[in-house]
Amino acid sequence: MTPPLTGRCLCGAITYYCTASPLWQGHCHCESCRRATASPFTSYFGVADGAWEISGNPAEYECSPGTYRQFCPRCGTQISYRSSRFPGERHFFAATLDRPEAFAPTRHYFWDERLPWLHLSDGLPH
């Protein structure tokens, strides 16, 4: 994906702007992400701190010690994720991009936690 990268929540109250290319792009299958998004997996891209800006006032939920999920308090859209496990970067939800078709995942994360009824044959490493 080529910067700038922009995105927003469903109602438009929260927007973001990234000035750098993603550090990585991938699909997460962990239980925490599945529950937070009510989906079988979710897709993220990581951006270095200092290369992104969020406008509006996202709500924040500490889902586990040192791990926070930001979302729109009005419409509920998940916007980003940050964790002390990944210092120096913010993870944005690919489906919130203004141009989600530009997202190009390169890997599956937490593949061992995937749901058994989900069958993917995209050839990406896991």
Image (spheres, rainbow, N blue to C red):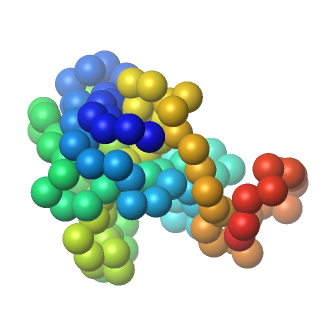
Image height of 28 relative to 86, above or below: above
Identity of the residue drawn at 34% across and 49% down: 21
- The percent coordinates of residue 70 (x first, y second) are 28, 50
- The percent coordinates of residue 90 (x first, y second) are 29, 59
Image height of 4 relative to 11, above or below: below
Image height of 11 relative to 92, above or below: above
The answer to whether residue 80 is left or right of residue 33 is left
- The percent coordinates of residue 12 (x first, y second) are 26, 21
- Most extreme residue toward the front is 2
Is residue 5 at least partly visible in the picture?
A: yes
Is residue 62 at least partly visible in the picture?
A: no
- The percent coordinates of residue 52 (x first, y second) are 19, 47
- Most extreme residue toward the top is 11
Identity of the residue drawn at 19% across and 52% down: 51
The answer to whether residue 1 is left or right of residue 16 is right
Q: Quadrant of the C terminus?
A: bottom right
